[in-house]
């Protein structure tokens, strides 16, 4: 039974037309464990969507769930604004010991509102406050959130149009390989910065994703990121890395920028930082940038204590050593081999692939074919979504805790779905 079998369903009569994921997956989900979701009739679906990257450790991870249940059973504080609580103290101490100190990162930790876009808004506001400048540079096909400041530095035309007002104080530059390697890195950016007639005001900051998730799994090379960091340093622009989707181990290391050996001035985290899918976000920055006045950026739910509890459990369980990192990188090789074989078999469709860690994309000639692959995958019990400016990329985001058998199962369904879509096109 699907939503369309209920005429009319409460989802159709009460919920807004803005809903999206439920249209691609027309079932009513009821339970979730590990790498699988179950609909209300008990049918399992292997989840290679993982809450858009919010469930790196899977659904209802038992270690995190136990910590949360114990906390709630003990009447732990659930809502605390930015008051000091034992849950917040435990998180801060663990984050410092397990993440910051081993990487020699000096960051102060800010709790903005518990969403990725709020963390980005905080980063943009702080950069402008510290530098006294307004313009922030972002990149083609970037996605940084759905609030106005975040939309201004987002590339997608459809999402930008939803703002309904001009999106100002931002400038876009070509992302790595946007021009197909035909020009040296940052040639245009450097020219605009050096030319007083370019019309580009001296930027306060540059914001970048090391892997553009919503933009189509566009992977920045480590040398490109190092070049960007050097450019920012030479021109006294703050470097903001948006690690909302690619942080928390998605690319292997805890932070996606570690591979490049750079230290951003500001970093945003959300999605999987709570580990359990609970709303939580962080804005990290160098201590000398901490020029906030008390309450200058706040929010009613910036102190989500249950999320602090599960986040602490996740850090303790998965980030006290390098085991998860090593396993993720090993599985990345497994996925890359499988996608290479798949694209070799289906060269007639012009399928390409790219990714890092456990985020990968299959690029098709158009969005219709990518959507057909996702639709067939759903019929076969696998949840996938599309990304890219035309929805032309099938996006793979399996939980980092998926077993080898689950990974192979999902890749097998993906291959069947690609071949099914190819056969439909050929027919």
Image (cartoon, grey):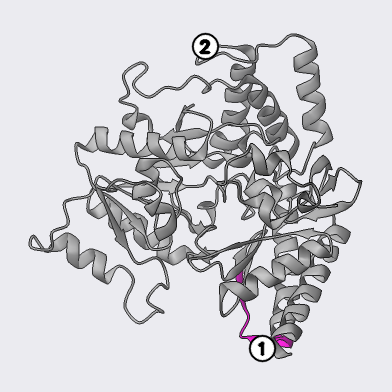
Depth check: give the residue in front, 158 or 350.
158
Judged from the image, the secondary structure of the residue bearing numbered disc 2 is loop
Mark 2–mark 1 Cα distance, whole angstroms, equals 57 Å
Q: Do tag 2 and tag 1 residues touch (Cβ < 8 Å)?
A: no
**Residue depicted at 67% across the width and 44% down the height:** 12
- Return the residue found at the far front: 7
**Relative vertical location of residue 240 with respect to residue 347 in this rendering, above or below:** above
Query: Which mark sits nearer the N-terminus, 2 or 1?
Result: 2
Is 239 left, or right, of 407 in this rendering? left
Q: Quadrant of residue 28?
A: top right
Pointer 2 local density, CA inside 10 Å: few below 14, some 14–19, many at least 20 = few
**Percent position of residue 296, x then y:** 33, 21
**Percent position of residue 266, x then y:** 40, 40
Circle on res. 347: 1
**Relative vertical location of residue 332 with respect to residue 54 in this rendering, above or below:** below
Q: Which residue is mark 2?
A: 83
- Return the residue found at the far right: 42
Pointer 1 local density, CA inside 10 Å: few below 14, some 14–19, many at least 20 = few
Q: Is residue 30 visible?
A: yes
Is 234 left, or right, of 197 in this rendering? right
Would residue 253 be counted in the magenta stretch?
no
**Percent position of residue 26, x then y:** 75, 53
Q: Quadrant of residue 178?
A: bottom left
Depth check: give the residue in front, 132 or 298.
298
Q: Which stretch is magenta?
A: 344-354
**Residue depicted at 27% across the width and 48% down the height:** 166
Is 107 left, or right, of 217 in this rendering? left
**Residue depicted at 68% across the width and 36% down the height:** 277
Judged from the image, the secondary structure of the residue bearing numbered disc 1 is helix
């Amino acid at each position: 039974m699907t939503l369309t079998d209920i005429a009319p369903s409460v989802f159709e009569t009460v919920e807004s037309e803005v809903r999206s994921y439920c249209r691609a997956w027309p079932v009513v989900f009821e339970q979730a464990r590990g790498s699988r979701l179950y609909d209300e009739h008990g049918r399992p679906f292997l989840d290679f969507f993982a809450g858009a990257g919010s469930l790196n450790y899977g659904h209802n991870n038992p270690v995190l769930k136990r910590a949360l249940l114990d906390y709630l059973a003990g009447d732990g504080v659930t809502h605390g604004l930015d008051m000091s609580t034992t849950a917040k103290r435990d998180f801060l101490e663990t984050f410092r010991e397990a993440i910051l100190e081993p990487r020699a990162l000096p960051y102060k930790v800010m709790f903005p509102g518990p969403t990725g876009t709020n963390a980005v808004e905080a980063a943009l506001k702080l950069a402008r406050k510290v530098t006294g400048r307004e313009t922030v540079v972002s990149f083609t096909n970037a996605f940084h959130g759905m609030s106005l400041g975040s939309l201004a530095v987002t590339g997608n035309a459809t999402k930008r149009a939803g703002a309904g007002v001009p999106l100002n104080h931002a400038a876009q530059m070509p992302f790595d390989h946007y021009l197909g390697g035909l020009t040296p890195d940052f040639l245009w950016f450097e020219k605009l910065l050096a030319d007083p007639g370019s019309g580009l005001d001296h930027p306060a900051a540059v914001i970048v994703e090391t892997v553009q998730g919503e933009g189509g799994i566009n992977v920045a090379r480590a040398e490109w990121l190092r070049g960007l960091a050097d450019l920012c340093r030479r021109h006294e622009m703050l470097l903001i890395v948006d690690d909302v989707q690619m942080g928390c181990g998605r690319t292997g290391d805890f932070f996606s920028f570690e591979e490049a050996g750079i230290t951003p001035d500001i970093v945003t985290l959300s999605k999987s930082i709570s580990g359990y899918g609970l709303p939580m976000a962080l804005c990290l920055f160098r201590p000398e940038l901490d020029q906030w006045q008390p309450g200058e950026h706040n929010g009613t739910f910036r102190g989500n204590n249950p999320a602090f509890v599960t986040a602490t459990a996740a850090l303790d369980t998965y980030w006290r050593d390098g085991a998860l990192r090593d396993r993720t990188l090993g599985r990345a090789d497994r996925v890359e081999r499988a996608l290479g074989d798949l694209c070799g078999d289906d060269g007639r469709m012009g399928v390409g692939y790219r990714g890092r860690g456990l985020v990968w994309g299959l690029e098709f000639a158009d969005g219709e074919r990518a959507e057909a692959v996702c639709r067939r995958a759903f019929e076969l019990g696998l949840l996938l979504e599309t990304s890219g400016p035309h929805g032309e990329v099938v996006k793979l985001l399996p939980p980092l805790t998926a077993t080898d058998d689950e990974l192979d199962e999902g890749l097998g369904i993906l291959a069947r779905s690609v071949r099914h879509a190819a056969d439909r096109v050929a027919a």
